[in-house]
């Protein structure tokens, strides 16, 4: 299946809110998984990397099952909220995918509906930005203290493409909300920026995605819907 067909099918899934579950993988060389967080976090978890060891994990304020911001509909989302003090902070979510072919290589694309909320005002004249990234790996994405650099670092290098059994890519810039009173919702797609990932002997791999920002503010992101396609290579 080419990326144009991917595009049509994914838009239909998000637009019509088809009743798929995280265990719907389809048949043949193309598999998919869909998450709308209606009934919970669906085995996704979250983390944060790039902040100073002195700040510890207190920089990560909240991971929860939540409704979208009040200006939008009341559909549910995975909410991740953190305080950013001008450092490059990577706020990410992750999940292990099961049921793919063992020891196989896949091309991966996704579409994400993502809400963004500014919880404290920020300097709009700064050069700070928000980047959306996603990746795959045979290793679980984990955060630990890097004493040499003085930060909490991801075992997968989110600042580059050095990942075991996969890769991480920057997809696009995301415009943060213009004010606390005006949250935003974005649809991010990766149709033109596919990943390559490899499963282990049990047909498993890890997917992660998130936002990297040095915007000095307290931000919340709401993952409202995620569709991921895996094409056997």
Image: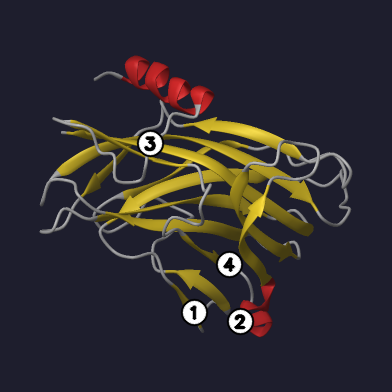
Residue count near mark 1 (Cα–Cα under 10 Å), binned few <14, some 14–19, many ≥20: some
Q: Mark 2 or mark 3, which has the lower sequence index?
A: 3
Q: CA distance from mark 1 to mark 3?
A: 40 Å
Instruction: Residue 138: give x, y in percent of width and height.
Output: 25, 59
* Contact check, label 1 and label 2, Cβ < 8 Å: yes
Q: CA distance from mark 4 to mark 2?
A: 9 Å
Q: Which mark is residue 53?
A: 2
* Contact check, label 3 and label 4, Cβ < 8 Å: no
Near-viewer residue (160 or 221): 221
The residue that label 1 is drawn on is: 146
Near-viewer residue (148 or 76): 76
Q: Mark 1 or mark 4, which has the lower sequence index?
A: 4
Instruction: Residue 63: give x, y in percent of width and height.
Output: 61, 64
Kindly identify the residue that appears in the image at 18 percent across and 52 percent down.
Answer: 199
Q: Which mark is residue 32?
A: none
> From the viewer's perspective, is the residue at label 1 or at label 3 nearer?
3
Q: Is residue 122 above or below residue 144?
A: above
Task: Count the numbered circles shown.
Answer: 4
Residue 128 visible somewhere in the drawing: no
The residue that label 3 is drawn on is: 20
């Amino acid at each position: 299946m080419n990326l144009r067909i991917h595009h049509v099918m994914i838009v239909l899934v998000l637009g019509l809110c088809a009743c798929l579950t995280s265990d719907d993988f389809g048949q043949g060389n193309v598999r998919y998984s869909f998450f709308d967080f209606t009934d919970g976090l669906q085995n996704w978890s979250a983390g944060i990397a790039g902040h100073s060891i002195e700040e510890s994990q207190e920089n990560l304020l909240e991971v929860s099952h939540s409704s979208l911001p009040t200006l939008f509909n009341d559909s549910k989302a995975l909410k991740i909220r953190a305080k950013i003090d001008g450092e490059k902070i990577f706020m990410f979510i992750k999940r292990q995918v099961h049921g793919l072919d063992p020891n196989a290589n896949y091309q991966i694309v996704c579409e994400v509906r993502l809400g963004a909320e500014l919880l404290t005002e920020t300097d709009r004249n700064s050069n700070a930005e928000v980047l959306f990234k996603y990746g795959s790996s045979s290793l679980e994405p984990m955060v630990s203290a890097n004493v040499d650099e003085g930060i909490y670092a991801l075992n997968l290098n989110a600042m580059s493409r050095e990942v075991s059994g996969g890769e991480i890519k920057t997809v696009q810039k995301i415009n943060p909300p213009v004010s606390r009173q005006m949250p935003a919702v974005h649809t991010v797609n990766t149709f033109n920026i596919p990943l390559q990932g490899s499963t282990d002997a049990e047909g498993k791999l890890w997917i992660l995605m998130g936002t990297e920002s040095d915007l000095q503010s307290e931000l919340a992101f709401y993952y409202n819907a995620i569709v991921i396609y895996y094409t056997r290579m």
